[in-house]
Image: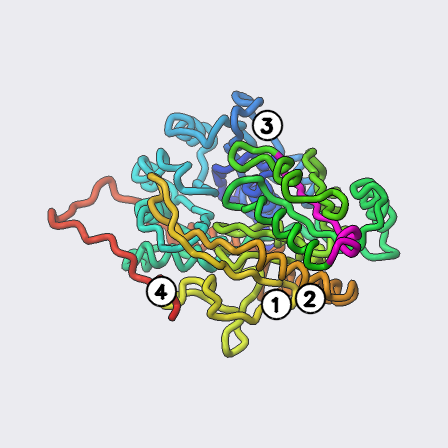
């Protein structure tokens, strides 16, 4: 325990109420919430109000301390889980505060889930800080989120884009907040490369043969994300079909596209119908992996693949890309949102790019040079979409033809070249510049939350305001990089 980063004895730790998905579940939010709890259980005590849609264990409570001790090698964890259908409400939070008496509230996911919490933030923040691990998919800066950002003490931004958005939206009030970049981190105990001669290599071969039905497949493309509209899963299938046509039928017969997703989703489409319409089974091999699988099996899927593809037009991060790189598998991605971080575009000085009001995004291709492990696909169309809760947001859509060309580029690399590029991606992701491992993420959370506790100023019971015209809400950053 002495080797743990900033270890604190159990009875001296701050207790944090974590509001997010149930950390036992396999959503992106749930997985990252779990890694943060595990990685910081030696420094903080945790209570997770664990959300799910119609949670089957609503009304129960669980002590996960022993499981946490066994997982992370400590003896004194305090981790409680309270299952919840939905993310909670004011009444439920007040009850938990009375029983558990936490020192802070930590929220994680889209701010629209927490409107009820922001409505009572003055009541809460007079006693304890609110920490927000947040992300936003795209520009223009969402001025409609300003009151949400103002309602917390610490903003931990998952992407560089989100950190810039937090500052731009808060404007002059940004100086009163702690705003830090903490990218998602993957557990290297669960995701890792498997090479010939390794302990799991025979298992990898058996798994690959079972998935591909012993076909003579030499090149595998992998997709691991939800079947929802903004992920453009249909475009991914169409791009793969175009790729097969580019290389010719005989070569295409030795290629395969595996999609680990639900083939039919009301928030997406019927992918089996798409496959039937676009993919001639004689030479276009498209497989669906729709069953729930273990983390170990998912690691095998990444390892049996030659490249991971993600063409989202709005994407806060893109967790499958990080998982892919941790296993040493290269990536192809649309240039938008947090996916830009993982491609490591660099400026004229060779520095990893950052964003500002003058340069909010690289989606228009200001910089082309990126990490060897990434093959970027730049959007061919940038339009403005929106809804009542989110009135405007750029939709960075790439074309299937461009994605197909990216697939062909990676295909034309030798097997050795793809492995070399993937290894370079893994080395960068686990390194000090990227900090995209679970351990690094957790250590950064400890640093930032400690800073948040040290700088916390209780909210006053009320404020006085001079009655005057409200300032105009106007986007102050560049919309196009000329």
Looking at the image, do the residues carrying marks 3 and 4 touch, with CB atoms under 8 Å apart? no
Left or right? Give the position of 200 relative to 315: right
**Mark 4–mark 1 CB contact (< 8 Å):** no
Q: Position of residue 420 (x, y in %)?
A: 74, 66
Task: Give the residue at x 57% y 48%.
Answer: 235
User: Mark 2 and mark 3: span between their CA atoms?
Assistant: 42 Å
Q: Which residue is mark 4?
A: 357
The image's mark for residue 371 is 1
Please give the name of the residue rendered at 48% of the width and 50% of the height, measured from the top-left corner: 314
Find numbered disc 2 in the image and state the secondary structure of the residue it sits on.
helix
Corner quadrant of residue 409: bottom right
What residue does disc 2 label?
Answer: 424
In this picture, which residue range is highlighted in magenta? 248-263
Compared to residue 280, the image places residue 413 above or below, namely below
Nearer-N-terminus badge (3/4): 3
Depth check, mark 3 against mark 4: the one in front is 4
Label 2 – label 4 distance at C-alpha:
31 Å
Which residue is the site of mark 3? 62
The CA span between labels 3 and 4 is 46 Å
> Are the two marked residues, 1 and 2, in contact with CB atoms closer than 8 angstroms?
yes
Q: Earlier in the sequence, mark 1 or mark 2?
A: 1
For the residue labelled by badge 1, is the local secondary structure a helix, a strand or a loop? loop
Q: Earlier in the sequence, mark 4 or mark 1?
A: 4
Q: Reply yes or no: does residue 144 show up in magenta.
A: no
Mark 3 residue crowding within 10 angstroms, few (<14) / some (14–19) / many (20+): few
C-alpha separation, residue under disc 4 versus residue under disc 1: 24 Å
Tell me which numbered mark, 2 or 4, is placed earlier along the sequence.
4
32 over 58 or under it: above or below: below
Disc 4 element: loop
């Amino acid at each position: 325990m002495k080797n743990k980063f900033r270890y604190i004895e159990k009875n001296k730790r701050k207790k944090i109420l974590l509001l997010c998905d149930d950390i036992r579940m396999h959503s992106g939010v749930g997985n990252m919430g779990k890694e943060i709890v595990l990685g910081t259980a030696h420094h903080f005590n945790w209570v997770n109000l664990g959300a799910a849609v119609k949670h089957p264990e609503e009304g129960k409570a669980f002590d996960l301390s022993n499981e946490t001790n066994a997982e992370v090698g400590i003896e004194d964890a305090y981790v409680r889980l309270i299952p919840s259908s939905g993310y909670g409400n004011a009444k439920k939070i007040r009850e938990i505060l009375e029983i558990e008496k936490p020192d802070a509230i930590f929220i994680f996911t889209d701010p629209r889930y927490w409107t009820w919490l922001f409505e009572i933030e003055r009541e809460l923040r007079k006693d304890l800080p609110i920490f927000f691990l947040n992300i936003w998919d795209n520009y223009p800066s969402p001025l409609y989120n300003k009151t949400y950002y103002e309602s917390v003490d610490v903003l931990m931004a998952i992407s560089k884009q989100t950190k810039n958005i937090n500052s731009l939206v808060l404007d002059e009030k940004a100086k009163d907040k702690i705003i830090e970049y903490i990218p998602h981190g993957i557990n290297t105990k669960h995701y890792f490369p498997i090479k010939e001669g390794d302990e799991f290599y025979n298992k990898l071969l058996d798994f690959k043969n079972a998935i591909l039905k012993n076909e003579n497949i030499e090149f595998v493309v992998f997709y691991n994300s939800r079947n929802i509209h903004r992920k453009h899963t249909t475009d991914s299938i169409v791009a793969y079909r175009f790729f097969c046509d580019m290389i010719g039928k005989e070569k295409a017969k030795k290629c395969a596209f595996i999609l680990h997703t639900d083939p039919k989703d009301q928030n997406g489409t019927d992918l089996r119908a798409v496959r039937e319409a676009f993919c001639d089974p004689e030479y276009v091999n498209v497989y669906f992996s729709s069953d729930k699988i273990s983390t170990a099996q998912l690691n095998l899927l990444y390892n049996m693949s030659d490249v991971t593809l993600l063409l989202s037009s709005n994407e806060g991060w893109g967790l499958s890309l990080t998982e892919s790189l941790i296993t040493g598998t290269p990536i192809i991605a649309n240039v938008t949102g947090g996916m830009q971080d993982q491609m490591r575009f660099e400026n004229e000085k060779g520095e990893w790019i950052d964003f500002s009001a003058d340069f909010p995004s690289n989606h228009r291709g200001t910089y082309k040079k990126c990490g060897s492990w990434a093959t970027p696909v730049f959007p061919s169309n940038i339009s403005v979409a929106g809804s009542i809760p989110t009135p405007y947001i750029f939709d960075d859509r790439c074309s299937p033809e461009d994605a197909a060309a990216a697939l062909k580029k990676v295909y034309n690399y030798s097997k050795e070249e793809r492995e070399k590029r993937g290894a370079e991606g893994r080395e960068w992701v686990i390194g000090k510049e990227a900090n995209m491992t679970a351990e690094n993420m957790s250590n950064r959370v400890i640093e930032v939350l400690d800073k948040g506790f040290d700088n916390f100023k209780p909210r006053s019971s009320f404020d006085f305001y001079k009655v005057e015209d409200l300032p105009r809400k106007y986007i102050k950053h560049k919309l196009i990089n000329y």
